[in-house]
Image (cartoon, rainbow, N blue to C red):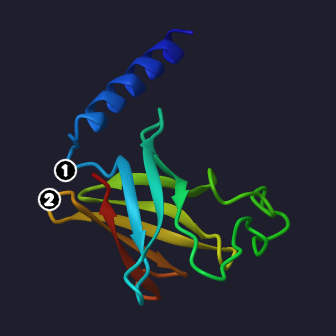
């Protein structure tokens, strides 16, 4: 019960800091805009939180549907994945990230459009205003990096 109370108090304190526009440039906790590599359009907002075990998780909290898109559910997720055919809005797409020096690794990221889960590392850049998100298969060299922008 005491842990739950402490967790609630911590979350309320975090909400106050974000509402006032403050953020910790050393932490990826907060809201991030994902941007399409080709068009440069904002696709979604991901909210990253720190769990009590100090790992990070990220939830898709806002989408900006593109014309002709009907990706409202994760229909391409593996049927054994609990996210299969569930709405992507509110879906946890980042899991298991652990702090490792100036980056966070050992995590996974779900691409709800493809239904694919990739290993992932994240790294803050530009004094905490941007987040490099590298999804990969087997080794980081075999992957792709997206830069997310911290939402004001």
Left or right: 43 in relation to 147: right
Q: In the drawing, what numbered circle is on residue 70? A: none
Viewer-proximal residue among 60 and 99 = 60
Give the residue displayed 53% in from the left and 17% down from the top.
Answer: 4
Viewer-proximal residue among 112 and 141 = 112
Give the residue displayed 38% in from the left and 58% down from the top.
Answer: 32
Instruction: Identify the element where label 2 is drawn.
Output: loop
For label 1, the crowd category at 10 Å Cα-Cα, with few meaning under 14, some 14 to 19 and many 20 or more, is: some
Q: Position of residue 66 (x, y in %)?
A: 57, 77
Left or right: 71 in relation to 29: right
Q: Residue furthest left?
A: 127
Q: Is residue 125 above or below residue 21?
A: below
How far is mark 1 from mark 2, CA to CA?
A: 6 Å
- Mark 1 or mark 2: name the one nearer the start of the chain: 1
For label 2, the crowd category at 10 Å Cα-Cα, with few meaning under 14, some 14 to 19 and many 20 or more, is: few
Give the residue displayed 65% in from the left and 70% down from the top.
Answer: 112
Q: Are marks 1 and 2 in contact (CB under 8 Å)?
A: yes
Write down the quadrant of residue 148 in the picture. bottom left
Q: Residue furthest front?
A: 67
Q: How many marks?
A: 2
Q: Position of residue 109 (x, y in %)?
A: 55, 66
The residue wearing badge 1 is 25
Instruction: Identify the element where label 1 is drawn.
Output: loop
Write down the quadrant of residue 20 in the picture. top left
Q: Is residue 76 above or below residue 1?
A: below
The residue wearing badge 2 is 127
Q: Position of residue 10 (x, y in %)?
A: 38, 23
Viewer-proximal residue among 50 and 69 = 69
């Amino acid at each position: 019960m005491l842990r739950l109370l402490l967790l609630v108090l911590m979350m309320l304190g975090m909400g106050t800091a974000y509402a006032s526009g403050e953020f910790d440039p050393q932490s990826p906790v907060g809201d991030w805009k994902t941007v399409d590599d080709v068009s440069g359009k904002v696709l979604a907002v991901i909210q990253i939180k720190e769990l009590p075990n100090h790992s990070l998780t990220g939830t898709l909290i806002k989408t900006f549907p593109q014309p002709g898109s009907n990706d409202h559910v994760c229909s391409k997720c593996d049927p054994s994945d609990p996210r299969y055919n569930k709405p992507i809005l509110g879906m946890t797409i980042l899991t298991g990230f652990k702090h490792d020096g100036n980056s966070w690794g050992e995590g996974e990221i779900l691409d709800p459009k493809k239904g694919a889960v990739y290993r992932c590392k994240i790294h803050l850049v530009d004094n905490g205003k941007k987040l490099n998100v590298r999804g990969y298969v087997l080794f980081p060299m075999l992957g792709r990096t997206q830069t997310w922008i911290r939402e004001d």
